Amino acid sequence: MFCFGHRGAAGHEPENTLRSIRKALELGAHGIEVDVHFTDGHLVVIHDDTLQRTTNGRGPVAKKTFAELRTLDAGHGERIPTPAEVFDAVARRALINVELKGPRTAAPVVALIDEYVRQRGWHYEDFLLSSFDHEQVCQAKHLRPEIRTAPLINKIPPGLAEFAEQMGAWAVNVSRRCVTQALVDDAHARGLKVFVYTINESRDIAKMKSLGVDGVFSDFPERAII
Ligand code: G3P
Ligand code: CA
């Protein structure tokens, strides 16, 4: 089963750090998922919109300058990375799933991906953009139709995967709490892939296999790579 290292390999190393990403690659993850915010004119890789859970800083990410964010310790002395640092660390060895957190992320992320494709020989297929904010997903697709997108969902939409097909998405990224056989079958009938987050336990891995999903996100990628 295809496995995205969730926030790198968050079960082993501080989440969303280069150390975590290197660990996920070492464990054989097929994809790397990271969370991205846009603040002070810069993209930064961090999950929460506040600093205290994952760094030695406090308060909203949006209240700090980029320079201030870069002085913080995101665990084991790692600093908050930029997406470009993540791309360089992955070096096309895995599919990179950038989760767009918060508003105004789609355009700068698309611009960065354009740079890697046009100037460094990467391919749009090296990336997947996802978000709970479906407006950002649509904006990314509108800006660069070649980029694969996936809306994130944590409840089943009334028309199952119809909304994702209408968005021109490549996949639908679904919470393990709401994934059903009907959704998986409907998505597949529409040509969409189904990736489920966050799968760490063996009983959940077995359930995902029985549902026939295309892949999972795991904090422990080695458990789901079968
Ligand atoms: O992209 C899958 C998963 O990461 C979404 O939830 O809260 O872990 O960012 P969250
Ligand atoms: Ca995420």
Image (tube, rainbow, N blue to C red):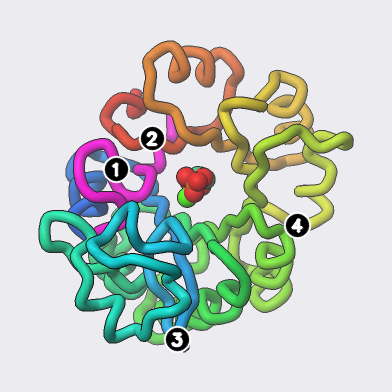
Residue 204: which disc? Answer: none
Classed neighbour count for the residue bearing mark 4: other residues with Cα under 10 Å, few (<14), some (14–19), many (≥20): some
Dot placed on the residue nearer the N-terminal end, 3 or 4: 3
Classed neighbour count for the residue bearing mark 2: other residues with Cα under 10 Å, few (<14), some (14–19), many (≥20): many
Regarding residue 113, the answer to whether it shows in the image is no
Dot placed on the residue nearer the N-terminal end, 3 or 2: 3
Residue 10: which disc? Answer: 1
- Residue 63 pos. (x, y %): 44, 79
Q: Quadrant of the C terminus?
A: top left
Q: Quadrant of the N terminus?
A: top left
Question: What residue is disc 3 on?
Answer: 40
Classed neighbour count for the residue bearing mark 3: other residues with Cα under 10 Å, few (<14), some (14–19), many (≥20): some
Question: What residue is disc 2 on?
Answer: 218
Query: Which SS class for mark 3?
Result: loop
**Alpha carbon of mark 2 to alpha carbon of mark 4: how far?**
26 Å
Amino acid type assigned to the residue bearing label 2 in the image: Ser
Amino acid type assigned to the residue bearing label 1 in the image: Ala
**Alpha carbon of mark 1 to alpha carbon of mark 2: how far?**
8 Å
Would you identify the image quadrant in which residue 176 lies?
Answer: top right
**Alpha carbon of mark 1 to alpha carbon of mark 3: how far?**
26 Å
Query: Which SS class for mark 2?
Result: strand
* Number of numbered markers: 4
- Residue 160 pos. (x, y %): 81, 34
Amino acid type assigned to the residue bearing label 4 in the image: Gly
Q: Residue at x 49, y 76 (%)?
A: 38
Give yes or no for contact between labels 3 and 2 (Cβ–Cβ under 8 Å).
no
Classed neighbour count for the residue bearing mark 1: other residues with Cα under 10 Å, few (<14), some (14–19), many (≥20): many
Q: Is residue 113 above or below residue 212?
A: below
Give yes or no for contact between labels 1 and 4 (Cβ–Cβ under 8 Å).
no
